[in-house]
Image (cartoon, grey):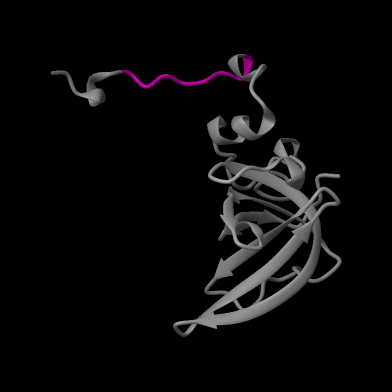
């Protein structure tokens, strides 16, 4: 019986992604290295919030709506609602009471794993960028 560790890792090329939907491409792409001009996210990977699916990675851009702080087991959690006209997503930053520049009306792009919650979609501790993809 052979081990899967003996098998070479197959990398996906951009050419092979041409027929794959944008949301599926997000899960297969290489991470963007930090320190790029203006932020860490490549805004060309942004998809509408209405197109995201649970249990997949996605990058969305929208306007910050409500910003709240709650506490669970003594840990602060910053909850931010981001909407783009096609839908909204609840973004939670654990261990944070605030994030500089994140306030209602501000553009925000986030990238992370999408979860389904009773009230809709959520992302926990996503990468974020204060630039808008639009």
Quarter of the picture containing the C terminus is top right
> Which residue ends up furthest to the front in the rendered image?
118
Residue 110, given in percent of the width and then of the height, sits at 68, 53
Which residue extends farthest top?
15
Residue lying farthest bottom? 74
Number of numbered labels in the structure image: 0
- Position of 99 relative to 63 (above/below): below
Residue 121 higher or lower than 106, as above or below: above
| Corner quadrant of residue 63 | bottom right
Expressed as whole percent of the image width and height from the top left, the position of residue 26 reads 61, 35
User: Magenta stretch containing residue 20, yes or no?
Assistant: no
**Residue plotted at (65% across, 70% down):** 79
Relative placement, left or right, of 106 versus 34 is right
- Residue 11 in the magenta stretch? The answer is yes
Judge whether 81 appears above or below 32 on screen.
below
Q: Is residue 7 left or right of residue 86?
A: left
In the picture, measured across the screen, residue 7 lies left or right of residue 27, that is left
Q: Position of residue 121 (x, y in %)?
A: 64, 55
Residue 118 to residue 79: above or below: above
* Residue drawn at x 81%, y 45% as measured from the top left: 133
Question: Residue 68, image x and y in percent?
Answer: 69, 77
- Screen quadrant of the N terminus: top left
Q: Residue at x 75, y 36 (%)?
A: 44
* Most distant residue in the left direction: 1
What secondary structure do most residues of the magenta stretch adopt? loop
Q: Which residues are magenta?
A: 8-15
């Amino acid at each position: 019986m052979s081990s899967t560790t003996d098998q070479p890792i197959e990398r996906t090329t951009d050419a092979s992604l041409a027929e794959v939907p944008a949301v599926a491409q997000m899960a297969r792409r290489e991470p963007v290295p930090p320190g790029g001009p203006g932020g860490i996210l490549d805004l060309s990977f942004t998809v509408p919030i209405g197109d995201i699916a649970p249990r997949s990675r996605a990058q969305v851009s929208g306007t910050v709506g409500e910003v709240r702080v709650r506490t669970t087991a003594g840990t602060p959690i910053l909850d931010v609602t981001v909407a783009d006209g096609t839908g909204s997503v609840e973004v939670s930053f654990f261990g944070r009471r605030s994030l500089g520049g994140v306030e209602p009306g501000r553009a925000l792009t986030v990238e992370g794993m999408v979860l389904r919650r009773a009230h809709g979609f959520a992302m926990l501790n996503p990468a974020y960028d204060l630039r808008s993809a639009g």
